[in-house]
Amino acid sequence: MTSAAARPAVAAAGSVVLPLALAQFVCSYAGSNMNVAITTIADDIGTTVVGMQTTITLFTLTMASLMIPGSKLTDIWGRKVCFMWGLAVYGTGALLASLAQGLPLMIFGYSLLEGVGSALLVPPIYILITVLFTDTKSRAKYFGMVSGAAGLGAAAGPLIGGLITSAISWRASFILQVLIVGVVALLARKIDDPPRVGAAPHFDLVGAILSAAGMFFVVFGILQSSTYGWFTSRQDFTIGSTVIIPKGGISPVWLFIAIGAIFLAWFFLHIRSTEKKGHDPLVSIRLFRNRTSNLGLTTQTIQWLTMQGSFFVISVFMQQVRHYSAIQTGLMLTPTTVGVLLSAAAAERLAKRRSQRFLIRRGFGVTIIGLLLVLALGRANSAVWTFVPGLFLVGAGIGVMLTSSVNVVQSAFPEKDQGDISGVSRSVSNLGSSLGVALAGSVLAAEVLPGNRDFALSLIIMTVIAMIGFVTAILIPKGHASAAPAESAQPATP
């Protein structure tokens, strides 16, 4: 921590926070703007909607898999250095994606490089605010600004992406990201990164590989349900020319999930063994033994799963059933954007009056009502206004929960654990986003119901999952779910 004399002056605070907020905005924007251009990009580069769904899912999965290692590298390399490297990798990925003529380069640039870049630059954002602004009021204010940038990027991404795609090209959306990253890199030169106190921690490479592999295979397995189905395989599953699972056998989805579970179990055994030997694990095992934190992480995962899954279903519905253009789809999602921004703006005031547990429950409740309204009123040929009430409430409910779940998690641990638990927290947020798109997309691709009913089925599944989140929020202990201290209240990041 810096001394009071070393804290940035109020006049200079904007120059420090602005590049951090812009960086958070562009990472969140990248995770949501693609939905409205799925059909356009797929046609242009010669792939399918499933191929683009895979690309979006892999981007979020890459961030989820590498966010914990990214947090550890921040401690090792230094916050500003890690932040700048993240910008460089991210910008390179966005540039390559803008030049893609086929799916392979799109996956390499967008899914891989932008995902890796995000995992490197997002953790330093919150750590820099923590060390540069030590008084609770300033820290809460600037965390709120970054949180607002995250919410704006995720919620307004479809609208901005739709406008750019329709007015210019989907490639211009990636060029915009390159330009923003360039501006952030120039502004970030003014950031004064306080020197690290003490020796740099050891990087647990084995733990990083195991955790990333575990999460990758779990979500990759869910993604395969769009091809093979959930229970009975709809076609032969082959590796090379060898049939591993014949058509009609058990779906290979469960094979991949089992492999992922094995890697995750191996990861937990590894970090426990590493800790017992007195070495530095990737993350301490004790972080996963806190009931309040575990419930908070669950609600956080479900929150992002519900939001991104619902956005994906509604975006595809607008484009494939109502035959809307990218800009029309983005405009249709505007009520959700407004709902997120209004409720997120009021979140700080609400947190002073109500417990985080209360806000999470109310957020899930409002989101559930919104999804039910979309199901009840929205139709293939219904008027535009029929979607507005439900979409607004979905956004408002998610906006209320934008920071509350993370506050519950962060406040469950002392200051020395804030870095590690922040990495875990952001990782599960991205994992939830990845699972939401994969799960919703697999239901749509399965075509188990006639007509357009698969879209309704997907939203019903999202609603049921949101109900599970509501029940989980009820289980959070009352004594540990009060308003979190400002110094540990870090917003969720997609």
Image: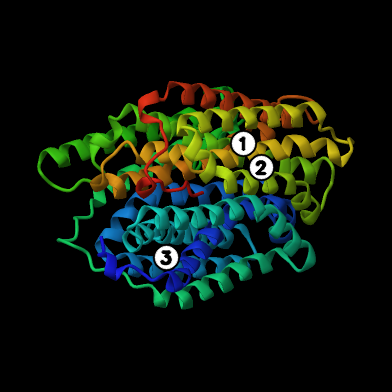
- Residue at the location (82% across, 40% down)? 321
Residue found farthest to the left: 277
Q: Is residue 219 visible?
A: no
Amino acid, disc 1: Gly
Residue 33, image x and y in percent? 65, 55
Q: Which of marks 3 and 1 is nearer the N terminus?
A: 3
Between marks 2 and 1, how big is the CA–CA gap? Answer: 17 Å
Q: Is residue 120 left or right of residue 201?
A: right
Q: Earlier in the sequence, mark 2 or mark 1?
A: 2
Q: In this view, does 257 lie to the left or right of 466?
A: left
Q: Earlier in the sequence, mark 2 or mark 3?
A: 3
Residue 104, image x and y in percent? 56, 59
Is 267 situated above or below 197? Answer: above
Tell me the SS state at disc 1.
helix
Residue 86's disc number: 3
Residue 194, quarter of picture: bottom left
Q: Are marks 2 and 3 in contact (CB under 8 Å)?
A: no
Between 284 and 478, the one lying in front of the other is: 478
Residue at numbered disc 2: 312
Residue 243, image x and y in percent? 50, 33
Tell me the SS state at disc 3.
helix
Between marks 2 and 3, how big is the CA–CA gap? Answer: 27 Å
Residue 122's disc number: none
